Image (tube, rainbow, N blue to C red):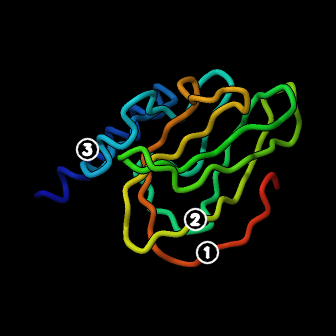
Amino acid sequence: MNYAIGLIVALAGLALVGCSGSVSVPVPSQLANVCTQNASAAVDAIQVSSPTAGSGVQSPLTVAGTVNSTDGLFFISVVLADGTHVIDYPGRSSQGGALAPFSQQVPFSVFQTTPACLWVYPQNVPDPVDGVRIPIVLEPGSTSTATPGGS
């Protein structure tokens, strides 16, 4: 019986996605307060398609989406709930001056599973209030020596 109810709820959710074009992904409770401002996967100049809210990620974290910046440069930060920056990393899209795709690998290191917030924001914004913030879970694993600014 519970399986049938779950299936009906899942199908209803898929129907809503088909009608509206977007869906709100539930965020696990331990991440609820990590990204308290502007928790969104898209603003006018930045859209993040990966990772999604609540995703567990290992290093290197792959951040993908589209960004519109004058010179194609932007920043990616991984921030803990207490405001500590795990990493601040420069990114580059495939072109400047237009909404262009990007895929950036961001190395980090943690020793235990840690709730965090992924920030993606324009280079010229010191406080990313108009950037994108996505709650994620950092998981221990391999680290990478990815080159800053690669695409």
Tell me the amino acid under the disc marked 1. Thr
> Which of the two discs, 2 and 1, labels the residue nearer the N terminus?
2
Tell me the amino acid under the disc marked 3. Val
Return the x and y of residue 7 as percentages of the image width and height.
26, 52
Check disc 1 and report the residue beneath it.
143
Check disc 3 and report the residue beneath it.
9
Secondary structure under tag 1 reads: loop
Check disc 2 and report the residue beneath it.
108
Pointer 2: residues within 10 angstroms few (<14), some, or many (20+)? many
Secondary structure under tag 2 reads: loop
Cα separation between marks 3 and 1: 39 Å
In the displayed structure, does residue 18 sit left or right of residue 68? left
Q: Nearer the viewer, residue 4 or 100?
A: 100
Q: Nearer the viewer, residue 71 or 67?
A: 71
Cα separation between marks 2 and 1: 6 Å
Q: Residue at x 39, y 35 (%)?
A: 24
Pointer 3: residues within 10 angstroms few (<14), some, or many (20+)? few
Answer above or below: position of 45 versus 62. above
Mark nearest the camera among 2 and 3 is: 2
> Which of the two discs, 3 and 1, labels the residue nearer the N terminus?
3
Q: Residue at x 59, y 49 (%)?
A: 50
Return the x and y of residue 108 as percentages of the image width and height.
58, 65
Q: Residue furthest bottom?
A: 142
Total marks shown come to: 3
Return the x and y of residue 74 as percentages of the image width and height.
73, 37
Answer above or below: position of 46 versus 79. above
Q: Residue at x 24, y 48 (%)?
A: 29
Q: Residue at x 36, y 47 (%)?
A: 81
Marks 2/3 in contact by CB < 8 Å: the verdict is: no
Q: Indicate the quadrant where residue 146 lies.
A: bottom right
Cα separation between marks 2 and 3: 37 Å
> Which of the two discs, 2 and 3, labels the residue nearer the N terminus?
3
